Structure formats: structure tokens, C-alpha cells
Image (cartoon, rainbow, N blue to C red):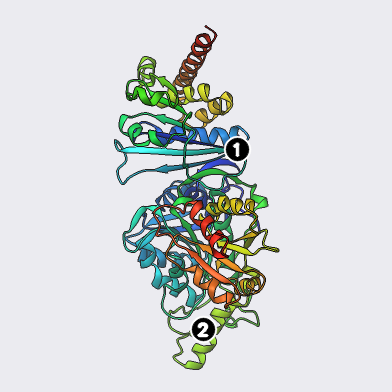
Amino acid sequence: MNADKKAVLTGAHFIDGDHAACEGAIAAGCKFVAGYPITPSTEVVERIAARFPLVGGIFVQMEDEIASSIAIQGAVWAGKKAMTVTSGPGFSLMMEHIGFAAITETPCVFINVQRGGPSTGLPTLPAQADMMQARWGSHGDYEIIAIVPNSPQECFDLTIRAFNLAEEYRVPVLVMMDECVGHMTEKVEIPEADKIEVVERKFTEKPPGEYRMFDTNGSMVPEMVKAGAGYRIHLTGLTHDDRGYPAMSPVVHNKMLRRLVDKVLLNEEKIRHIEEDQVEGADVVVVSYGITSRVVLPAVNKARKDGIKVGHIRLITVWPFPESYIRELAKKVSAFVVPELNLGQIVYEVERCAAGNAVTQLVSHAGGAVHSPEEIYDEIKGVLGHA
Amino acid sequence: MARTEIRIAGFGGQGVILSGYIFGKAASLFDVKYATLIQSFGPEARGSACSAQVVISDEPIDYPYIRKPDIMVGLSQEAFTKYCHDLKPGGILITEEDMVSVDENLISEFDHYTVPATRIADQLGRRIIMNMVVVGCFAAVTGLLKKDAVKKAVEDSIPKGTEELNIKAFESGYKHGLQILKQREVQETE
């Protein structure tokens, strides 16, 4: 399927990441957004509120983020594509409903424009400190997909990808922007609608009566139903059987939970999205994501001029984490340098997968700004004793 | 031109961000360059110090913030005092003539231009278009971007119905900039 011609603003624009994410959602076919505007994500919903009346969407400014994160799931079960947008404390409030979306397999998108925390923290300044919260913030075992743009262009492109992944795997997909990317204005090229690939929901063709809500027919992702088409369904946050009925049994729970996790983890290679630069033959590999991946470049170039063999990989999909990729790479390189705008989150995933085969060095930053390229350069030099 | 860093600083309400937006748009949509605009602001908006950072380059821009600007535009005393020390020695400094008084010792370090943007805007009838006078002057003295590209970006960024006035302001600023360059040429040949 392709995007809707009338909804897509084809052409070159000079817009910020927040606005670009809004256009990405519209191009992906999002028709419902509920949100509680919060800096630095406000511009996303501001634009949604202005654009939705023109493209047949509904925006509701809710009473809070708890309501926003569940209202979108109502819209999804009514047949629409939906998302919510937030930052900082708002993301914390949404955690319970990320779990609800995971267990009910509700395809939906959460945009989090990360700012400094905890609590109110730094409302107008960047951080990348919600990366583990994105993965583990709701209680219980589950998997989500999280993707991280590093430019306004990617805020557009990856928001579309987020909607597509949500439909394909029936999971909440988190677009983990940050204040810098959200408020950064650059050229964004929006393609013609027929060049934008949009994944539509897979509705069942089984008649009511034969359809079982969570029966996967051998695949790992069950089919959904069209609201109003005569199906009687039961949707619950309780552990449920194939019919969707509550079933408080360890056997049912085990089966349900393992499928929820497996449908993401066993497809990790398919979902994987990594950008590689001169990794072949490298001694040191910098692992970055989001805005930090751009700050890394002057440092990497400088180190290369010094004759150090430095590779750079950028994780565009951070969750599910590319475990096997890092594990294999760790056998070929001496060290990983992991700069992040937090005091250490993704670095522990890298370290775990490196499994002692390569040294792993964090370059931490408390947030509020980005690293200076020199800080990263020093670690690249220092990690193998080049300094 | 690998990478040019520009800071426009003033107080909220002067059109600081819009000026930066126009340079970025001109570069990336109407010229053939890359541009990144970053705006910084406090919790307050109108009346508080505010600055736009623009990076313009022939190559894709990696590090998005400015570190040692090549060009600074100062539209208020507070913003000028706060940021003038960042400017590269020999960098281009453009200040609003009546809003910013510049320390004589500083001028020798920079390539300094002044523009009476507020007075010109008043003469054209609306003080609010002061920033477009500055944008015009910037285009003339820096020569960083094609004049037509900047003009198109102005037209593309302002409210409908205000094109005539804004373009007039832009052209007045541009003319002022050219005049300064001409005077300098004359002085140099003398």
C-alpha cells in the first residue's frame, strides 16, 4: 500500500524534527492522536492539531498522559492508526499502558522527545536517558520496538517506519527522539505519496464464530478484526487464551508470554537497522545512536587522521538490541566506545554482548547539551592506550 | 566553504529565530547547500535573551551546534555582550546601530558592520520588519548565499499579504550593506 496523496506534503521543506515526525505520522496513515502537550514535544501535537482537520484525522488534547496513552489504543481497536507524543514525566506516566499495548498486541506508536531527567529535570534541553525505560518501563516481561532518529529527515522517515513495524508485529513502537533532534530545523524531503510504503493492518478473513482473537495460525502475529464487522471480541490486560478470555494458568501465561517476546526477538534480524562506517578491519568501533551519532563524526574523523583504525556503527533500531551482531563484531575488534547522553544505559547491552571479547568504554554525559567531539576523541585514543 | 557558523542574538520578539530560519531555508532549499538551525530559548519567550544558531555548509552537517561562530548578528546589547566573545577573530560582526553600542577595542578584532535597521524599518512604516532589514544587510555583506535564494526564503517564510513590505525591508537592508562595501572600497583605494 502507498500513502494517501491528499495527506502527504510532497516537496522539500525546512522544518524541525517535531514537525517532521508529525508529517511522518500523517503519511503513515495515522488518523488519531491523543496527547498532553509537553516540552520539547509540543510542536508535534501543535502541528497535528493544525493538520488533522485537513486530512480527516482527530486530535484530542487529553487530561493527562495516562489518558492519552490509552485513548490511542481505543482508536486502534476501532480500526484506526494512532499515536501519542510526550517527553520527560509524561513518558513515565505512559508506562502502564505500554504494557497494556504489549499484552493486548495493540499496534500503536509512542513518540518520546527525550529531555533531561529524572522528574521535571531539564524541560528544554536534550538527553538520551529514557532508553532503558523504553525497554523495561512497564512491569512484567514483554518486548517493544524502539527506533532512534538523528535528523528531522529521519523523524519523518522513521515515524512512518514505526507505524509500519507496529502493524507488522502488533507491538507498541517507540520513536525515541531527543530535544536536539526535535528542535533542530533542516531540510526534509517528503517523497510523492506513491513512493511511500505503508503497511496496512492485517484483518482476518475468517467469519465471526470461526475467528479466535489470538490464534496465530502458525505465524507469530495474530490477525485483527474490523470494528463494526460483526465480531464479538474480548480484550483484556489479564493473561488470556487464544479466544482473548482471561485464563489464570501458568501454562497459558507461559505460552502467551513467550510468543509476545519471541515475535520480536526471533525477528530481530528483520527489524535490525544499523548504519555501518568502516567497521571492516577496525580496532575500535564507536557505537552510537540518535543525536550523539552526529557528534561522534568529527571525533572519528580526527582519530582516523591520527592513523587509528576506527569504525562507527549507528543503531537506528535500538530495541530489540542487535545482540548477535555485536557478539560477532566483538570477536573482531579490540574495543567499543559508547557515547550516550546519559550515565550509562546502552553501553551495558554492548558490554553484555561483547562478553569479554572486547573492551567496552562508556563516554557518559548527564545531558542538557551534547558531548564535545573532543571528549569522544579522547576515549577513542585512550581505550587502546594510544593516548 | 566547508562549514560556516552563524549566531543571531537578540531578545525574544525581534525576529531572531525567523532570521536564522530564513538563512537556513535559503541555503538548503533555494541555494545548493546544507543548513542546520538550532534555536535556544529559556522558559520565557518575548523580551528575554534569545539566540539562533545556523550552520551552513557545502557538505552534510554532523555536529549541529556552533562552537566558534564565523558570523555574529547582534540585535540587543544584552545578547551582544553575552555572545560577542565567542566570535572568531576576524569574524564578521553585524550589529543594530541604535540597539548595540560596541566597545571600540573589540571592533579591531572583527570585520564590523552596523545597520540602522530599526530606523530604516520605521521609515518604511513598520518597526516589526526590522529583522528583514538585517537579513538584507547580512546577505549583502557576507555574500554567503545567493541574493535570490535569500529573497525567495523571505517570501516563503512570512505571513501572506505582507510580502511587499518585507521585501522592501530586505532590499533596503541589502542596499545599505552594499553601500558599506562600496565606501570601504573607496577608502581602500584612497
Q: Residue at x 55, y 64 (%)?
A: A383
Which residue is label 1 attached to?
B2
Q: Position of residue A120 (x, y in %)?
A: 31, 59
* Neighbours of disc 2 within 10 Å: few (<14), some (14-19), many (20+): some
Task: Say what secondary structure mark 2 lies in.
Answer: helix
Q: Position of residue B151 (x, y in %)?
A: 53, 25
Which quadrant would residue A122 be assigned to in this image?
A: bottom left
In the displayed orientation, state which residue is furthest to the top.
Answer: B190
Q: Given the image, what chain letter belongs to the residue carrying mark 1?
A: B
Q: Position of residue A317 (x, y in %)?
A: 57, 64
- Tell me the quarter of the image containing the N terminus of chain A: bottom right
Q: Is residue B119 left or right of residue B70?
A: left
Q: Residue at x 46, y 78 (%)?
A: A235
Q: Of circles 2 and 1, which is in front? A: 1
Q: Do the residues at pointers 2 and 1 share their chain?
A: no
Kind of residue at disc 2: Leu
